[in-house]
Amino acid sequence: MALLGVPAHRLRTLHCILRSVASRPCSSCRTNAAPANNREVSCTFGTRDPMDWSDTTEQAAFRSEVRSFVQERLPDRYRQPASRHNWQHDRSSAIAEESEAAMSWTAALGERGWVAPHWPREYGGADLTSMEQFIFNQEMAFAGAPGAASVHGVAMLGPTLIVHGTEEQRREYLPKILSAEAVWCQGYSEPASGSDLASLQIRATRDGDDYVVNGQKIWTSGAGTADWVFALVRTEPDAPKHRGISFVMADLKTTGISVRPIIDMGWGSELNETFFEDVHIPVSQRVGEENRGWYVGMTLLDFERSGISNAVGLQRDVIDLVDAATNEERDKSQLDRTPILRGLLADRYIETNVGLQFSLIIISMQASGQVPNHEASVAKLFMSERGQAVARTGTQVFGLYSNLWPDDGDTSPRAIATAHYAPMGAHHTTASVMSIPSTIAGGTSEIQRNIIATRGLGLPRG
Ligand SMILES: Cc1cc2nc3c(=O)[nH]c(=O)nc-3n(C[C@H](O)[C@H](O)[C@H](O)COP(=O)(O)OP(=O)(O)OC[C@H]3O[C@@H](n4cnc5c(N)ncnc54)[C@H](O)[C@@H]3O)c2cc1C
């Protein structure tokens, strides 16, 4: 069996990895085995009973509905593989073409409740099952279609308000998330509180019907283009550290809030410092009970860590890389000179299939009413590290084009002759640089390993 000229021992690796992540025993070797990527895998190591991940008739119909919808309604701006534009940036862009693309895509998805497909219908979602969400995310990711609202609003705050908010808060805030009238950002981390988040210091003092907030948040992604922030603040400094925290929401235009961009190594300014100086936040903008915000905040992190579209997006990246490496127009000399690239691409292909299996395990847990915990950490750890590997392989596929940045405007004859590859190379430069923080954001790899060791393997705390 050959895949991109990969020797059999690598395929044996694929078989072993798939066995280790699946959950149903093989009838011949009694170890676990599963097919990859919704398709049946032919097992060269004996007969087995594959788990059936193929779509049911209803799921296939839903998949086809999503695919047709995306084909018909996705704005042109989001159709180029090398130009995966940032929806949140587009929404607030002064260039009409960009803001119109963001808003028309939001409106199109909104017609079917697909801005937040996992929310209940009564709050404007589509009440999709876990498997339907997976199919939806898979089709969106394969098309390179962006979600049409900030992830902080749709994937994090919205579900948290549905669980912990008052009905008044749900009616006030949820529709504005769906219509993109309010884009949210997350104010958790502080300069001295990241992994040990419960040590946070920003102070909220009660003053009548308001809290007066003083302190600083850091690494607030997207605060420069967001409208509102949800934040954890300390309301009871003398209580044990997890017990004196409250969860509040604030309009970023409130007097006393200022946002200062941090320029990252990709020359972007997505990350920010957010300062609070005598900021009055009405008590009605607190979610959950006073001093019980830690538990509200952790519900939200569970939503953050169970994100599943990553594996599918990476699969698409690998397919793009294979296309680029084998395209007729391309100067193949690099591939000929470095056959090792074939092995690297095959490894990335294997890994993204394994990542998809992790996602499917999480989906099947959710579908049966279980809350993924260390399983979500396994998926996050694996996919963030493998995402970095895909990005590094991308820079190898594009060779010297990977030294370009998107705005370099390379006008050399060679770049013009291969105009198709210059932007793709530049895209992979950005992807490679921006993949580096993925093992920090949302909980570092070390913290994920701690969770897997203690909660997954039952090992003692260090
Ligand atoms: C791209 C990006 C986007 C982000 N977006 C947001 C956002 O929108 N909102 C927000 O609030 N925050 C955001 N963050 C912050 C992020 O949550 C923190 O960076 C992360 O939790 C780590 O905290 P820290 O940076 O303070 O590192 P620290 O916690 O100081 O960790 C430093 C190092 O020590 C290790 N370490 C710490 N504790 C342990 C331990 N117990 N065992 C083993 N090793 C340990 C860590 O793994 C790390 O290697 C973002 C970060 C990045 C990189």
Image (cartoon, rainbow, N blue to C red):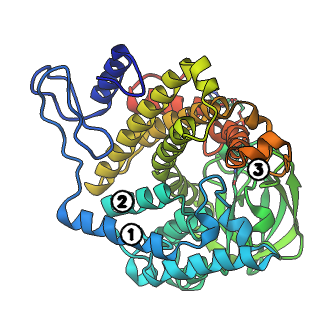
Q: How many marks?
A: 3
Where the C terminus falls, by quadrant?
top right
Q: Secondary structure at mark 3?
A: loop
What residue is pinned by disc 1? 66
* Separation of residues labelled 2 and 3 (CA atoms): 32 Å
Circle number at residue 135: 2
389 versus 191 height, above or below: above
* Separation of residues labelled 1 and 2 (CA atoms): 8 Å
Q: Could one spot residue 278 in this view of the protein?
A: yes
Q: Residue at x 66, y 46 (%)?
A: 198
N-terminal of the pair, mark 2 or mark 3, is 2
Q: Amino acid at mark 1?
A: Val
Q: Amino acid at mark 3?
A: Trp
Nearest the viewer among 327 and 307 is: 327
347 versus 411 height, above or below: above
Residue 218 image position (x, y, % from top left) = 79, 51
Whether label 3 lies within 8 Å of ligand 1 gets the answer yes
* Callout 2 touching callout 3 (CB < 8 Å): no
Locate ligand 1 by image quadrant: top right
Q: Residue at x 46, y 70 (%)?
A: 71
* Callout 1 touching callout 2 (CB < 8 Å): yes
* Separation of residues labelled 1 and 3 (CA atoms): 34 Å
Tell me the crowding category of disc 1: few under 14, some 14 to 19, or many 20 or more residues within 10 angstroms, Cα based.
Answer: some
Nearest the viewer among 142 and 232 is: 142
Q: Could one spot residue 250 in this view of the protein?
A: no
What residue is pinned by disc 3? 219
Q: Secondary structure at mark 2?
A: helix
